[in-house]
Image (cartoon, rainbow, N blue to C red):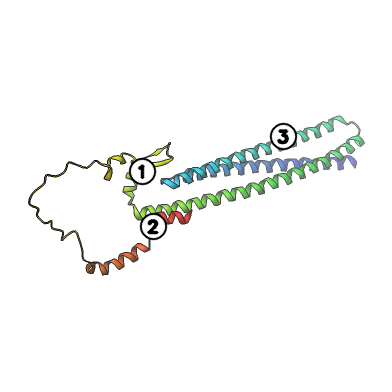
Amino acid sequence: MKEKLNQEKVHQARKVLEEKKAELQRTKKQQEELRDKLQRLESKVLVGGENLLDKADCQRRLLETAAKELEARARNEQRLRDDLQKKEAERLDLEERYSSLQEENTAKTRKLKRAVQLLNSAKAELADQQREQQREMEGILDGVRALRRELQLAELVLDAYIPREYQALIEQYVHWNEQLGEWQVRCVAYTGNNMAPGPPAAKSHHHEPPDLSDRYLSYASLSGRGSRLARAASAVPRPHTALRQRQ
């Protein structure tokens, strides 16, 4: 009767250990899935734009930090798994060490209680880690979603003020200045007011008055159209104002 009871307790302890191992495997799989998801999110948030690239780089560093923390937690779980395996080996050693049924029964009872305590402690520690990891993952995902909203808003502002074909042209002719820490347009020194003025035109003693009829419009002709343009312009915020509001 005692031997049967002892076998049942050993079987229950082995079953608990197997369940714990399966639970650790599921936790590891979930962590791998979360790590893959973080990598996919990281590859999506890097898009063009001066301020957006800085924010995307900052978010990438946060994702790398989170990935390192996940790896540290994986190592901690591996340590717990090794401890459980060590305890299992000790239990098997106890079964071989004691010859008498009474001694074996007493030793196994103590060992089973200790194993249950270790399992409960490991479960509590794993539960705490999972809750903390879930909170951290939710914070990271919230940050990614906020960054995605900011990117979408910036893209809407860019599309409203700069046509897409010109955006591609601008991206083609900009480069990152490491010394100044900002994006610059190539050959900007050779454009606009930066160019040296040409030779003065030859003076003429007789000047014909220029025809400026197509250069200026009267206020009367713009009064009706100006109000419509003002209403249309007010519907789209200025790019710098929108950026300040988001910051």
Inspect the image, locate mark 2, and give the three-letter code of the amino acid beneath it: Arg
Furthest residue toward left:
206
The answer for how far apart the CA atoms under marks 2 and 1 are is 21 Å
**Residue bearing the label numbered 2:** 238
Q: Nearer the viewer, mark 2 or mark 3?
A: 2
**Residue bearing the label numbered 1:** 171
Inspect the image, locate mark 1, and give the three-letter code of the amino acid beneath it: Glu
Sequence-first disc among 2 and 3: 3
- At x 55%, y 40%, the residue is 64
The answer for how far apart the CA atoms under marks 1 and 3 are is 53 Å
Inspect the image, locate mark 3, and give the three-letter code of the amino acid beneath it: Asp
Is 42 in front, or is 97?
Answer: 42
Residue 5 lies in what quarter of the image? Answer: top right
- Quadrant of the drawing holding the N terminus: top right
Sequence-first disc among 2 and 1: 1
Residue 121 lies in what quarter of the image? Answer: top right
- At x 62%, y 38%, the residue is 71
Q: Which mark is residue 82?
A: 3
The relative height of residue 229 versus residue 92 in the rendered view (above or below) is: below
Residue 156, how many percent across, how many down? 40, 55
Is 205 in front, or is 196?
Answer: 205
